[in-house]
Amino acid sequence: MTTTPQTAAHEKARAFSTGFTVVINSFDAATRQGLADDPTLTKLIELLPPDSLLSITDNLTTDDAVLVPTAGTIALRLTDKQGDIVGAVFYTPNSKAKPIVIDPTGYGAIVIGEPNKANEIIAFDDAEYGIDAYQCMADDKITFIISPQKTKQCFKKMVQHWSGGSLLTVPMTIDNKGMINLLAGVNARALVTIADILTMLHANNSYEAILAADETQIINLKDTAYYPEWRDDPQLNEPMIYADGRFELYHDGLFFVKYNDDDPANITFKFKAFVCSPIEIIAKTRDTSSGTWGRLLQWRDDDNIKHQWSMPLSLLQGDAKEYRKELASQGLNITTNSKQRSYLDPYIKTTPFTNGRYA
């Protein structure tokens, strides 16, 4: 097995997590007296399950053999979406010093609420802000996750990691839409409000009312992924995602294009496949008895003469040679590459019609 740098880093983090779990669980639970009336820790001990806060009596050593001054702190375990411990955040009660974070994964979260896959997850990048928001909502159908790292990249890592399997919402204000660019392509939604969500909750607005407000925008972050331009001229239509790529229509042809999208925020061009000269799917068609369903196709031949054909979808069954022969006879240039021309079938059949256009 070949070990990539990413794989090695993951294995190292997992090995650290296993040993760290044993060490961190060896400490006793913190008492209210040990919290010294620290406001944040007092809120946490009331919100979290028993024994969530730990009294740390020793300094700890990281996987890089660095001694971390954790003696005398109160620790809160950080977990991943499977519920495994991946690190901890260490608070010094009533101190202005930043909490110490040990988490080699970068995506460990403070979890408030029941970690149920059926729950909506709301993500925050500030502990005090997230704690106050949860106190206002206190809904057993919502789980809060908070990144303790205080960096945009770690927040992004956390959102990416937790976004699979559950609806994940990232609250933000209209003047903080830079967060949308940071999280572009992630399988989550942005809840964009005029005022910050905590202010609205303190004003006795329910979460449901905030979601339904006219000024509220809900943006699917997965749809905001930036695909790099591999050519200078504009596309004639919106690209259509299909399988592991997407159809892109330009003045000189229809192309099926693939991208490297392992990192949704850093998508790179992989390759293109020419399918045919430009062709548009104008509308769905059917007869007066709601039979003979098809698609109205439009294209221009080499003499720039416009052609239209109401093509029955039944011609896409079998090897689909007949419909390609008809298109070619009317001047559509189709690639002779069998694999590339096969992309024309799903392009015709699956092009969406959001406004229900019929001809």
Image (cartoon, rainbow, N blue to C red):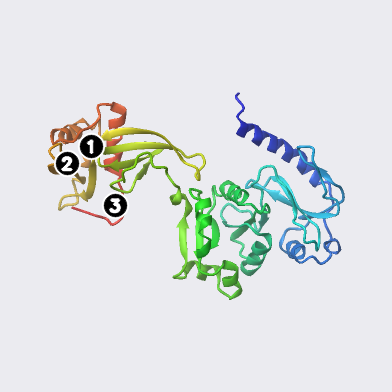
Circle 3: residue type: Phe
- Looking at the image, the residue that sits furthest to the front is 232
Residue at the location (61% across, 67% down)? 137
Task: Tell me the element at label 2.
Answer: strand
Disc 3 residue crowd, few under 14, some 14–19, many 20+, Cα 10 Å: few
Looking at this view, name the residue that lies furthest to the bottom: 203
Inspect the image, locate mark 2, and give the three-letter code of the amino acid beneath it: Arg
Q: Which residue is mark 2?
A: 300
**Residue 148: horizontal and vertical position, in percent?**
68, 54
The image quadrant that residue 74 belongs to is bottom right
Question: In the image, what residue occupies the spot 62% across and 62% down?
Answer: 140
Task: Give the image location of residue 206, x and y in percent.
Answer: 55, 71
Real-space Cα distance between discs 2 and 3? Answer: 22 Å
Q: CA distance from mark 3 to mark 1?
A: 21 Å
> Residue at coordinates 25% horizontally, 42% vertically from top-left?
251
Type of the residue with mark 1: Ser
Relative horizontal placement of residue 329, taking residue 209 as reference (left or right): left
Pointer 3 residue: 353
User: Where residue 72 sits in the image (x, y, percent)?
Assistant: 86, 54
Residue at (52% x, 56% y) in the render: 178
Please indicate whether residue 303 sits to the left or right of residue 55 in the image: left
**Quadrant, the N terminus:** top right
From the viewer's side, name the closer residue of 93 and 120: 93
Mark number, residue 277: 1
Residue 84 badge:
none
Q: Does 133 appear above or below 256?
A: below
